[in-house]
Image: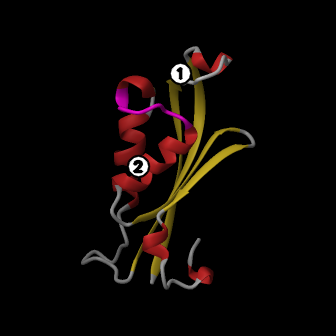
Amino acid sequence: MYCISKTMTVSASHSLHLNYESKCSRLHGHNWRITVFCMAKHKDENGMVVDFSHVKRLIHGRLDHGNLNELLDFNPTAENLAEWIVGQIPQCYKAVVEESEGNVAMCVDEQMTVGVPAALLL
């Protein structure tokens, strides 16, 4: 089993659609710190789990300096963003999204980690 992670900073704005009053309902921005975790039983023909530059292009390339409300078709909470990231990369089993210091959301595809010893997972 091979595991990799790619951490990147994405500067993007969003506003949240909430069922209660919040200042987060107004458009505002973050320097999101996003870490994508990928694994594979076998390396590809290039000797990789997935090319780091492909991960960056799929996430950073799509979101950086954008309005997440315009780029994505869901309420762009940190939790929803983490779930979306896991779905973008077939080898991705976990995404950690830090919206601001100390405010972190994570999504794990538990089906991908069945039978994988915890010591192998980043």
In the picture shown, does residue 94 fall above or below 10? below
Q: Mark 1: few, some, or many residues within 10 Å (few <14, many ≥20)?
A: some
Q: Is mark 1 on a helix, strand or loop?
A: loop
N-terminal of the pair, mark 1 or mark 2, is 1
Examine the image and state in which quarter residue 72 appears. top left
Q: Which residue is drawn at 42% across and 25% down?
A: 69
Q: Report the side of 101 relative to 111 (left or right).
A: right
What is the residue that sits farthest to the left in this orientation?
45
Q: Residue at x 41, y 33 (%)?
A: 74
Q: Which residue is drawn at 40% across and 45% down?
A: 59
Q: How far apart are marks 1 and 2 (CA)?
A: 24 Å
Write the start and end of the magenta stretch as one range.
71-77
> In which quadrant of the rendered image does the N terminus lie?
bottom left
Q: What element carries label 2?
A: helix
Q: What residue sits right under mark 1 in the picture?
A: 15
Q: Residue 95: x percent and y percent?
A: 52, 55
Name the front one of labels 1 and 2.
1
Q: Magenta part mainly helix, strand or loop?
A: loop
Examine the image and state in which quarter residue 54 appears. bottom left
What is the residue that sits farthest to the front in this orientation?
19
Examine the image and state in which quarter residue 41 appears. bottom left
What is the residue that sits farthest to the right in this orientation?
102
Q: What residue sits right under mark 2 in the picture?
A: 56
